[in-house]
Amino acid sequence: MMEHAWTGYVNHAWGSNELRPISKTGHSASIFGASSSGATIVDALDTLYLMDMKEEFERARKWVAVSLHFDHVSTSETCRNPIQDLCYILITDLIRSSLRVLQNPP
């Protein structure tokens, strides 16, 4: 199910906040704010990693590293977008670090 949903998002809405599945278009004016900040990409990072979808995770991680910017976020979006996105990114990094330690004990 995750692979199917992720493939639909990648093919039809990459970089948008969410996918409109019926029209197969990206959408950004929603609870995530009016700007396109890849909310689905950021939100899916930990799931992609935990489900061992390595190629998909790496593509999403690269998008975050290159394309995720907060300079276009309006003040009305500030409480939600950057803070929540930062939390997702930090949690994903923590999971990766923890799993690396568990897989390669000292």
Image (spheres, rainbow, N blue to C red):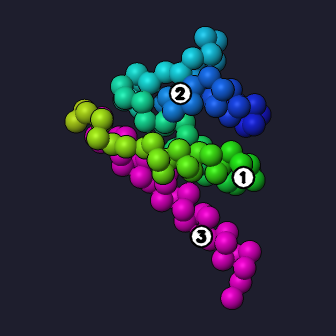
Horizontally, residue 90 falls left or right of residue 49, namely left
Tag of residue 54? 1
> How many labels sit on residues?
3
58 left or right of 51? left
Q: What stretch is highlighted in magenta?
A: 77-106
Please tell me the numbered disc located at residue 13. none
Residue 50 in the image: above or below residue 44: below
Question: Mark 2 = which residue?
Answer: 18
Asked whether residue 72 is drawn in magenta, I would say: no
Q: Of callouts 1 and 2, which one flags the residue occurring earlier in the amino acid sequence? A: 2
Label 3: which secondary element: helix
Q: Can residue 29 be seen in this view?
A: yes
* SS for dot 1: helix
Residue at mark 3? 97
Residue, x 47% and y 47% (percent of image)? 66
Mark nearer the N terminus (1 vs 3): 1
| Distance of label 1 from label 2 (alpha carbons) | 21 Å
Q: Percent position (x, y) of residue 75?
A: 22, 36
Above or below: residue 91 compared with residue 99: above
Crowding near pointer 3: few (<14 within 10 Å), some, many (20+)?
few
Seen from the viewer's position, the closer of residues 36 and 80 is 36
Residue drawn at x 62%, y 64% is 96
As measured in the structure, the alpha-carbon distance from the residue carrying label 2 to the one carrying label 3 is 28 Å
Q: Is 104 covered by the magenta stretch? A: yes
Residue 65 position, x and y percent, is: 48, 51
Residue 2: percent from the left, percent from the top?
A: 73, 37
Mark pair 1, 3: CA separation: 15 Å
Q: Is residue 47 visible?
A: no
